[in-house]
Image (tube, helix red, strand yellow):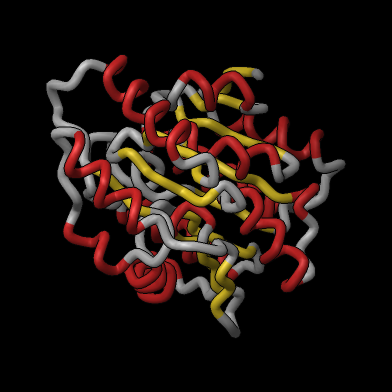
């Protein structure tokens, strides 16, 4: 892992890594990566505008989010103008032509039992989720208690994994991940992931960063993500993402 905090250094790193070839795709998380910070749902409109420009310049853009299918679909279509995306932490994807359901079973039964046992709440958009379910964590809860809840769920229900996104606790079927969904999309669309770039902020993005040629963590990302990232951009949330997007825009003007 190397730390980078300016566009020029990132341009040089990408060009060297990809042998002076342009990237094929940018996969980006949403919350904490395209928002102004990890504690906000406010999208950085400048970052979204650059993504839209990159899409028109021939770079495939894939938003990969824990959010429900409808939310990611709307943002991808109306703000980024992209027709491929990943929702529910890789449980569902869209390749521009058809919906791809990677998950094999729902986690509704788990959520019901956990809500009865622990002092957690269910977000309203869970009703729109098919597979990955979210549980809201109280702001004053001890991190060790979060880990304890996650261990309890995984021990009791071995067919799921539990990850904390920084916004909510997510219960996801084990066969699903953003990385797996990205691999499926790449096969269907003929995209070379060895020349793709992914950027994220939390441990749910680990598989996605591992699936591509360059995996990038924003500066305020989870430590688990930073440890496996190729690059950490030393700015928080969307400020880091804009450095990446501007670097790629500059590369396209050079090649």
Asked whether 78 or 246 is in front, the reply is 78
The answer to whether residue 249 shows anywhere in this view is no
Residue 150 point in image, percent of width and height? 38, 30
Asked whether 105 or 180 is in front, the reply is 105
Residue 202 point in image, percent of width and height? 44, 33
Residue 11 point in image, percent of width and height? 66, 36
Position of the N terminus, as image quadrant, is: top right
Horizontal relation, residue 102 to residue 222: left or right: right
Choose top left, top right, bottom left or bottom right for residue 140. Answer: top left
Residue appearing at x 29%, y 69% in the figure: 128
The residue lying furthest to the bottom in this view is 97
Residue appearing at x 25%, y 66% in the figure: 127
Residue appearing at x 53%, y 56% in the figure: 90
Asked whether 84 or 177 is in front, the reply is 177
Choose top left, top right, bottom left or bottom right for residue 188. Answer: bottom right
Above-or-below relation of 160 to 25: above
Choose top left, top right, bottom left or bottom right for residue 153. Answer: top left
Residue appearing at x 51%, y 51% in the figure: 173
Residue 160 point in image, percent of width and height? 50, 44
Horizontal relation, residue 112 to residue 89: left or right: left
The answer to whether residue 79 shows anywhere in this view is yes
């Amino acid at each position: 892992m190397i730390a980078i905090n300016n566009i020029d250094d990132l341009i040089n790193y990408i060009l060297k890594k990809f042998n002076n070839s342009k990237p094929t795709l940018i996969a980006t998380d949403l919350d904490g990566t395209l928002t102004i910070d990890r504690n906000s749902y406010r999208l950085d409109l400048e970052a979204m505008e650059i993504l839209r420009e990159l899409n028109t310049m021939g770079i495939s853009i894939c938003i990969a989010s824990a959010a429900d299918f409808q939310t990611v679909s709307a943002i991808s279509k109306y703000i980024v103008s992209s027709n491929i995306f990943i929702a529910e932490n890789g449980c569902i994807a869209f390749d521009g032509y058809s919906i791809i359901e990677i998950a094999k079973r729902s986690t509704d039964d788990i959520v019901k039992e956990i809500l009865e046992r622990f002092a957690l709440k269910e977000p309203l958009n869970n009703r729109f989720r098919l597979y990955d379910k979210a549980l809201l964590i109280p702001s004053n809860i001890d991190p060790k208690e979060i880990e304890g809840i996650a261990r309890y769920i995984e021990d009791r229900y071995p067919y799921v994994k539990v990850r904390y996104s920084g916004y909510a606790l997510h219960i996801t079927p084990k066969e699903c991940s953003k990385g797996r969904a990205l691999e499926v999309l790449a096969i269907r669309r003929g995209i070379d992931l060895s020349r793709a770039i992914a950027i994220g902020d939390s441990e749910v993005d680990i598989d996605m960063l591992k699936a591509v040629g360059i995996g990038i963590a924003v500066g305020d990302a989870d430590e688990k993500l930073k440890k496996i990232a190729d690059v950490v951009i030393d700015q928080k949330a969307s400020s880091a993402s804009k450095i990446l997007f501007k670097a790629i825009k500059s590369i396209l003007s050079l090649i």
